[in-house]
Amino acid sequence: MPSNNTVQTNKIKIMKHIIISVFLFATLMVKSQNPNNHWQLGSRDLNFSTNLPTVNNSGVASQYGLATITDNNGDIILYTDGSKVWNKNHSLITNGDELENTYHEINSVVIVPNPSNANQYYIFRAENYNTLGSTSEAYYNYSIAEFNPTYPQGILLNINSSPGFLENNFRKRLKEASGSDILNMFSFSPLTVATNNTSDAYWVVLQSKNKILSYKIDQFIGLNTIPIESTFTNSQIYNYGYNAASTGFD
């Protein structure tokens, strides 16, 4: 039988481990919240850096979905509505209006830091292309924003010397592993991002009809434009909906 002193000592050790674990968990939670401390909602900046969240007027309004990214102190780095890109001063970055597409609607947008370049941020957009009376097509593209000594307030980089359909010099379309275009009917274009299990890389996950495409962004090459594909059976994860079915699309 262990002595009372031994039991008491073990209890103290256990309590210390619990306290340390809770402290570490809380510290990690605080750190992990900082990059998402600002939510740009229309013309309002919702700031979670303070004990009670504050709402400020950014002066920038948009009808599209917004994405915001902040630094480890919780301060805004940049934000976008998928059509334009603004910096922390609520001013357009250089080339910040070059995301525009004459016949498009932005379904969703996410911003992802580049682990291979601390000064760069990927902007991924899900768009719905309006074909003026015929069936709309949803697709995805990406752009790169950078802060450097020449452009301390930010610049949208020229990443596409030979733009194709629905592209320009500042945005490129994401494709399937085979190089085929991603096309979903109408506005169906889910888009999300997650960290890997070691929290040193990101996965951008989207859908191309009956495939899930996962693009890795890591510290070695940045964005790998050849995705890992998960294929499902016909209509298992994708449904064209009543309108598409009634018009005979498959």
Image (cartoon, rainbow, N blue to C red):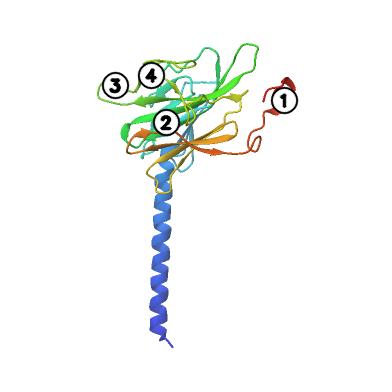
Asked if labels 3 and 2 touch by Cβ distance under 8 angstroms, the answer is: no
Figure label count:
4
Foreground label between 1 and 3: 1
Q: Secondary structure at mark 4?
A: loop
The residue that disc 3 covers is 151
The residue that disc 1 covers is 245
Q: Position of residue 192 (x, y in %)?
A: 51, 36
Q: Secondary structure at mark 1?
A: helix
Instruction: Report, in whole angstroms, how far the alpha carbon at label 4 lies from the one at label 1.
Output: 36 Å
Q: Which image quadrant is residue 68 in?
A: top left
Asked if labels 2 and 4 touch by Cβ distance under 8 angstroms, the answer is: no
Instruction: Report, in whole angstroms, how far the alpha carbon at label 2 lies from the one at label 1.
Output: 32 Å
Note whether 79 is above or below 19 in the view shown: above
Note whether 148 is above or below 167 in the view shown: below
Of callouts 4 and 1, which one flags the residue occurring earlier in the amino acid sequence?
4
Amino acid carrying label 1: it is Ala
The residue that disc 4 covers is 160
Amino acid carrying label 4: it is Asn
Of callouts 4 and 2, which one flags the residue occurring earlier in the amino acid sequence?
4
The residue that disc 2 covers is 225
Q: Residues within 10 Å of mark 1 (few under 14, many from 20)?
A: few
Question: For this rendering, which residue is in front, 210 or 33?
Answer: 210
Residue 129: image tag: none
Amino acid carrying label 3: it is Tyr
Q: Residues within 10 Å of mark 2 (few under 14, many from 20)?
A: some
Amino acid carrying label 2: it is Thr
Going by the picture, which residue comes out furthest to the left?
Answer: 149
Instruction: Report, in whole angstroms, how far the alpha carbon at label 1 lies from the one at label 3.
Output: 49 Å
Q: Residues within 10 Å of mark 3 (few under 14, many from 20)?
A: few
Q: Quadrant of the N terminus?
A: bottom left
Q: Quadrant of the C terminus?
A: top right
